[in-house]
C-alpha cells in the first residue's frame, strides 16, 4: 500500500496524471508555436512578449494568435490587470450580465474585490464591451493612486479636450505627465477611441515597469530594466542596492506578506498598497500608503531612511526603528482621502496634517512636533504632541497625550483630557511635563528633547535647584536635549526642570521619575533560513517571572504580534521555525510583554540565510518535514517542475514555463494561500484532486487537498484560521 492506495491503483493514477498533464502541456505549447508569425514585425511585439513571459497576456487557446490589433474587452482588461498585480481574492457580485458560467465571472469578482473598476449602471458590468483610452487611463490611475484633483477637461492641452469626460481628466493628466499616454500628431487625445491589445500591452508595460514578481527572490538594481522607469512588487521579496527613476508600486496582491527594501533610492513615489514593508537605508521624496481593500498597512523606516512627504489614505502604522543620525525617517505626514483614516504612529514626525476624519494613535515613544487638524480627529495613545494648530471643531486629545500647547481658530473648541476648551494655550517650552521610567534603558538612550519658541534660547537650565552645566545637555535644531546620563541620576519621584529663556521668560517642566520597568537581561538567539543549517530550528527562551501562559500579554516583533507556544513546566517560550523562516535576514528585537505591564523581556534575534545559490527555498522548507508525511515541493532552479513525493517512488512531471501553473500552485501551497491555490487548481483542470489523493503540508499551519466524491475540497488552517472551499467543476480556461 502507498498512501492508502494499492500499488496497482497508484501506478494507474500516476499514468493517468502523466497523460492528462501531457495533454495540458500540449495545449499550452501549441499556441506559443503559432504566436511568432502573429507578432513578428508588429510594433507591440516587445511589450506583448514581456507580458507573456510574466503570465499576464496569453494567446488564444483556439488559434494560438495574440491578435495585437484586436479591440480589448473590459473582461480581458480586468484579466490582464489581475494577473499583472497578482490579484486573486474575490468579492460577491450581482451584475445581471455576468453569469456564473462565463469564463470571466471570477475575473470580475476579483476586480470588484480590489475596487479598480466600476459597473456601467443599471446593475451591469458590460464585460464584453470595449475599453476606451480615457477608461484605460482612469482604471490604471486608480491602481497607482493618482490624485485626480479638480482637473477640468478644458485645462488639458488637447484640441478635443471638450470630449474628455470630467471623471477621467485628472487621470489623463497624470498619465500624460508621466509619459505613459500621449496625444496624436494632430493635437487630439481621442478619449473615446477603443484601445487594442497591443496598446493595452504598451500601457501596462510602462506603468508596470520591472515586475518583481517571484516570491522569495532577492532582487538588486541589476534586475531593473533600462527601458522603463517604474518597478512593481507583487510577491514577498527583497530589493537592494537599486535606484528607481520612476515610481515603486507595492501592490495589494501581496496581502500581508513581507517586503524589504535595502539601500534603495526612489526618485518618484513609493506607493504602498499591500504587504508589511521594511525600508532600510531607503529614501524617497514622496510615499503614498493606501489600500482600496482597507488593509492595515505597516511601514517601517530604519537606518539611513528619509521620506520628506507621506500621504496616508487608509489604515496604516508608521514605525521608525534605529534611524541613522541625520535621517528623520517620516518627516511630514498628511492624512487624506475620502473616508475616516486610522493611523498609528510609532515615530517622530516633524509635521502631521489631518485633512480627513481620523483617529491618530501614538505610542509612548511617538513625538509629533507640529499637528495641524483641518478635519475632525481623535488623538489618543501615550505620545507627545508639542504644538497643535486646530482649525475645526471635533478635535480631541485624550488624557494620556502629552500636549505641549495648542492654538484654536476663531470660534473653534477642542477637547483636552475630556475638558472642552475654547481659548488657545501655548506653552513656552514643550513638552510641559515628562514621565521617565528609569528602569527602561532603551527609552532613556536618546535623552529628552525640548522644543523652544522660535528665536529663543535657554540661557540657564536648572534641575530642582541645581544649575545644569553644558555637559548635561546639548542644543538641537528645535531647542535642547537633556542627556541620558543626567536623567539616570534622578531619584524616583517628582522633579522640576526650569528654563530661563533669552526673552526674559521662565518656563517650568514637571518631571516624574518612576522605575516601573525592572531591568531584564536581554537574551540572544540566532536562526538560519537554510534548512540544512544547525540553526534552522525553533527558538526557545526561558522567561523569568512568567509562570503561566496567561501571564503573557503579547509577544511582538516591532508592532507585529507573533504566534508562540509556552511550556509552563519549564517556563519556556518557543517560536516555531515555520514562522521564523518568513523573516528576511537581519537583526530583530522580539519583546515579551506581561499582563502586569511592569516586566518586559527582550530577545535579540539574528536571522541569517546561508542557503547556497540555486537551492530552492520552497523545496527546502518541506524537506525538513517528517519523512513519513506526503509532501509537495516545487523546484524552479533551471527548470519548472513539480515533484510529488511518496514512499513508493518519486514520479516527476514538468510544467511548461510560459504559464508556470504547477510552480505557482506549489508556491501557494507552501505559503498556505488557499484562494490562490484554488485558482491554480482550476487552471490545471483538477488533476491533483483525483490523481494524487490527499496531501498534508505540515509547515505554516497545514493544508489539505482531498477528493470527496466528485467534489474536490481544499482545507487551509494556516495561521490558526480554518476555511474550506469546495469545487464541483474546474474551469478549463488558461
Image: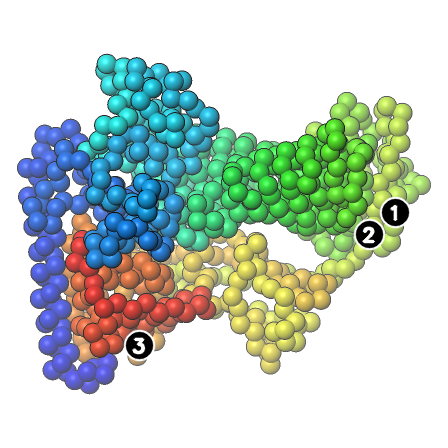
Residue 454 seen in this snapshot: yes
Q: Which residue is mark 2?
A: 513
Label 2 Cα neighbours within 10 Å, binned few <14 / some 14-19 / many ≥20: many
- Callout 3: 10 Å neighbours few (<14), some, many (20+)? some
**Mark 1 = which residue?**
495
Q: Position of residue 311 (x, y in %)?
A: 52, 36
Q: Which quadrant holds residue 424? A: top right
Write the residue at 25% across / 49% down.
Answer: 97
Disc 3 designates what residue?
629
Residue drawn at x 16%, y 84% as measured from the top left: 6
Q: Percent position (x, y) of residue 163?
A: 31, 22
Q: Quick one: label 1 or label 3, which is nearer the N terminus?
A: 1
Q: Is residue 634 left or right of residue 607?
A: left
The disc label shown at residue 409, or none: none
User: Can see residue 219?
Assistant: no
- Dot 3: element: loop
Image quarter where the N terminus lies is bottom left
Q: Is residue 393 left or right of residue 711?
A: right
Q: How many marks?
A: 3
Q: Residue at x 55, y 31 (%)?
A: 308
Tell which circle, 2 or 3, labels the residue nearer the N-terminal end. 2
Seen as rendered, the residue at the extreme right is 465
Amino acid at each position: 500500500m502507498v498512501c492508502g492506495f494499492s500499488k496497482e491503483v497508484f501506478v494507474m493514477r500516476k499514468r493517468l496524471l502523466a497523460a492528462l498533464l501531457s495533454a495540458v502541456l500540449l495545449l499550452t505549447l501549441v499556441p506559443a508555436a503559432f504566436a511568432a508569425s502573429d507578432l513578428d514585425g508588429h510594433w507591440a511585439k516587445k511589450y506583448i512578449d514581456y507580458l507573456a513571459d510574466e503570465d499576464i497576456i496569453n494567446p488564444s487557446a483556439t488559434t494560438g494568435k495574440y491578435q495585437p490589433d484586436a479591440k480589448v474587452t473590459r473582461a480581458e482588461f480586468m484579466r490582464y490587470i489581475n494577473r499583472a498585480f497578482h490579484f486573486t481574492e474575490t468579492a460577491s457580485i450581482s451584475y445581471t450580465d455576468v453569469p456564473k458560467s462565463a469564463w470571466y465571472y471570477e475575473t470580475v469578482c476579483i476586480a470588484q474585490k480590489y475596487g479598480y473598476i466600476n459597473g456601467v449602471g443599471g446593475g451591469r458590468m458590460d464585460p464584453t464591451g470595449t475599453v476606451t483610452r480615457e477608461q484605460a487611463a482612469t482604471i490604471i490611475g486608480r491602481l497607482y493612486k493618482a490624485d485626480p484633483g479638480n482637473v477640468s477637461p478644458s485645462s488639458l492641452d488637447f484640441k478635443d479636450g471638450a470630449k474628455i469626460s470630467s471623471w477621467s481628466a485628472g487621470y489623463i493628466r497624470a498619465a500624460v505627465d508621466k509619459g505613459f499616454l500621449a496625444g496624436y500628431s494632430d493635437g487630439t487625445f481621442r478619449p473615446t477611441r477603443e484601445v487594442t491589445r497591443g496598446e493595452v500591452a504598451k500601457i501596462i508595460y510602462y506603468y508596470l515597469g520591472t515586475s518583481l514578481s517571484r516570491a522569495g527572490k532577492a532582487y538588486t538594481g541589476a534586475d531593473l530594466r533600462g527601458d522603463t522607469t517604474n518597478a512593481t512588487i507583487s510577491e514577498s521579496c527583497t530589493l537592494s542596492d537599486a535606484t528607481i527613476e520612476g515610481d515603486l508600486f507595492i501592490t495589494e496582491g501581496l496581502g500581508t506578506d513581507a517586503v524589504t527594501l535595502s539601500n534603495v533610492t526612489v526618485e518618484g513615489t513609493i506607493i504602498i498598497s499591500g504587504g508589511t514593508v521594511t525600508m532600510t537605508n531607503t529614501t524617497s521624496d514622496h510615499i503614498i500608503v493606501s489600500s482600496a481593500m482597507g488593509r492595515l498597512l505597516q511601514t517601517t523606516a530604519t537606518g539611513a531612511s528619509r521620506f520628506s512627504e507621506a500621504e496616508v489614505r487608509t489604515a496604516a502604522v508608521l514605525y521608525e526603528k534605529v534611524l541613522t543620525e541625520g535621517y528623520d525617517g517620516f518627516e511630514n505626514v498628511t492624512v487624506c482621502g475620502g473616508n475616516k483614516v486610522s493611523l498609528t504612529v510609532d515615530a517622530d514626525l516633524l509635521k502631521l496634517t489631518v485633512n480627513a476624519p481620523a483617529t491618530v494613535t501614538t505610542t509612548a515613544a511617538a513625538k509629533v512636533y507640529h499637528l495641524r487638524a483641518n478635519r475632525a480627529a481623535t488623538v489618543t495613545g501615550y505620545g507627545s504632541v508639542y504644538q497643535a494648530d486646530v482649525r475645526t471643531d471635533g478635535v480631541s486629545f485624550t488624557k494620556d497625550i502629552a500636549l505641549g500647547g495648542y492654538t484654536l481658530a476663531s470660534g473653534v473648541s477642542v477637547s483636552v483630557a475630556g475638558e472642552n476648551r475654547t481659548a488657545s494655550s501655548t506653552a513656552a517650552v514643550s513638552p510641559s511635563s515628562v514621565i521617565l521610567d528609569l528602569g527602561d534603558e532603551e527609552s532613556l538612550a536618546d535623552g529628552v528633547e525640548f522644543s523652544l519658541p522660535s528665536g529663543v534660547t535657554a540661557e540657564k537650565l536648572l534641575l530642582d535647584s541645581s544649575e545644569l552645566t553644558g555637559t548635561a545637555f546639548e542644543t538641537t535644531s528645535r531647542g535642547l536635549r537633556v542627556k541620558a546620563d543626567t536623567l539616570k541620576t534622578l531619584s524616583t519621584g517628582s522633579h522640576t526642570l526650569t528654563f530661563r529663556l533669552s526673552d526674559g521668560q521662565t518656563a517650568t517642566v514637571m518631571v516624574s521619575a518612576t522605575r516601573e520597568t525592572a531591568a531584564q537581561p536581554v537574551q540572544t538567539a540566532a536562526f538560519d533560513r537554510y534548512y540544512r543549517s544547525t540553526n534552522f530550528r525553533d527558538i526557545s527562551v526561558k522567561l523569568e517571572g512568567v509562570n503561566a501562559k496567561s501571564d503573557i500579554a503579547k509577544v511582538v516583533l516591532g508592532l507585529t504580534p507573533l504566534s508562540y507556544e509556552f511550556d509552563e513546566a519549564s517556563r519556556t517560550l518557543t517560536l516555531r521555525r515555520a514562522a521564523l523562516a518568513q523573516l528576511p535576514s537581519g537583526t530583530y528585537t522580539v519583546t515579551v510583554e506581561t499582563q502586569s505591564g511592569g516586566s518586559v523581556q527582550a530577545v535579540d534575534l539574528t536571522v541569517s540565510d546561508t542557503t547556497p545559490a540555486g537551492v530552492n527555498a520552497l523545496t527546502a522548507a518541506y524537506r525538513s518535514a517528517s519523512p513519513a508525511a506526503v509532501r509537495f515541493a516545487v523546484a524552479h532552479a533551471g527548470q519548472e517542475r513539480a515533484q510529488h513525493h511518496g514512499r513508493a517512488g518519486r514520479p516527476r512531471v514538468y510544467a511548461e514555463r510560459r504559464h508556470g501553473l504547477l510552480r505557482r500552485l506549489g508556491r501557494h501551497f507552501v505559503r498556505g494561500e488557499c484562494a490562490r491555490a484554488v485558482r491554480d487548481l482550476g487552471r490545471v483542470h483538477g488533476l491533483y484532486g483525483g490523481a494524487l489523493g490527499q496531501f498534508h503540508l505540515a509547515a505554516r499551519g497545514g493544508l489539505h487537498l482531498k477528493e470527496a466524491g466528485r467534489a474536490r475540497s481544499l482545507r487551509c488552517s494556516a495561521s490558526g484560521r480554518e476555511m474550506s472551499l469546495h469545487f464541483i467543476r474546474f474551469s478549463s480556461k488558461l
